Amino acid sequence: MRTLVLSGLAVPVALWAGTNAQTTVDSQSTQQPSAIVRPAEVGFNPSVLPEGARVFRNLSYVTNGHARHKLDLYLPAAGTNLPLVVWIHGGAWLGGSKELCPALFLLRDGFAVASINYRLSQHATFPAQLEDCKTAIRWLRAHAREYGIDPDRIGVWGVSAGGHLAALLGTTGGTTEFDKGEYLTVSSRVQAVCDWFGPTDLTQMSKFPSDIDHDAPDSPESRLLGGPVQENQEKARRANPITYVSKDAPPFLIMHGDKDRLVPLNQSELLADALKRAGVQVTFHVIRGAGHGFGAKEHFELVREFFIAQLGSEPARDRTNAQK
């Protein structure tokens, strides 16, 4: 495991909401950068779409499902057998939207990008959120050929509550416990995970300085579980990515601010240590001075380098032809 301490920028959480059908973008997106990952450098906006990018909005990944069972898919102007990065928004499992997708800068490197919604805790308690994310992965893999995606190169990236779900996708690849609904013959396993300051062991959060009482009956964590955290130890165990860690988990990139007063740094430390003990490839970056969010260009560059290293940015077909 490699740990690196960087400087960071703390920013507040923002929630956003948004259309349907394919769109070809010829200039810049009208999307605004998320406050939780706001770029620190003027002129750098990870949510800007490259010229000619193809956009498919509000694709339903569950037949006749909940209103939140939708995803947006972004493709580069050209290319087939593209590696895919799936963005999972944050929002304390209570809010947030796929409409804001800071992963769009990866399109310039030949990645496809999907941004997914999932049911929030006011709609259903855990494990509904993880089940939705897994269904979205299976839907994307089942429709990979249709959209020119390589089904064997899928990574996930999430922040805060989305980081928690991304980590769960990574560690539960060896179990079908949370695979429900459609496309059950298709795997929900992912090949790389980027987790930005996601919770892990919900029972430990209140042991560290925080701006909220994580054990309170109305805390985001208690709402996720359907009852007070400390009175629902087994539910908290099931919602903990560390519970499922094995040597078969994919490579992880974990990033967390050392001044985070919403999700304590300890949450990422616990996950990184568990992955290391299991022999999983994990890189853990501590962002010095950052609270619950950061967004310097160097932080996005670390994400870019990680996904290029783990998934590759050159279409698989082109790599194969080049070797002949």
Image (cartoon, grey):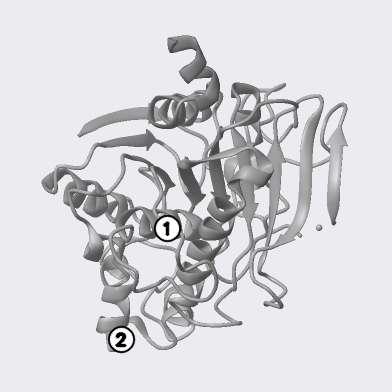
| Left or right: 48 in relation to 5 | right
Q: Determine whether the residue tagged by mark 1 lies in a helix, strand or loop.
A: loop
Q: Residue at x 67, y 77 (%)?
A: 65
**In the image, farthest residue toward the left:** 277
Q: Residue at x 52, y 76 (%)?
A: 181
| Vertical order, 152 against 160 (above or below) | above
Q: For mark 1, what is the residue?
A: 187
Query: What residue type is disc 1 on?
Result: Ser
Q: Quadrant of residue 1?
A: top left
Report the front residue among 11 and 3. Answer: 3
Q: Of label 2 and label 1, which has the lower sequence position?
A: 1
Q: Are marks 2 and 1 in contact (CB under 8 Å)?
A: no
Of tags 2 and 1, which is closer to the observer? 1
**In the image, farthest residue toward the front:** 324
Percent position of residue 139, x then y: 58, 59
| Left or right: 298 in relation to 32 | left
Report the front residue among 299 and 63. Answer: 63
Percent position of residue 112, x then y: 62, 36
Report the front residue among 157 and 91. Answer: 157
CA–CA distance between discs 2 and 1? Answer: 30 Å
Q: Is residue 262 visible?
A: no
Query: What residue type is disc 2 on?
Result: Asn
Q: For mark 2, what is the residue?
A: 232
Q: Residue at x 73, y 52 (%)?
A: 99
| Vertical order, 74 against 50 (above or below) | below
| Vertical order, 177 against 6 (above or below) | below
The mark found on residue 216 in the picture is: none
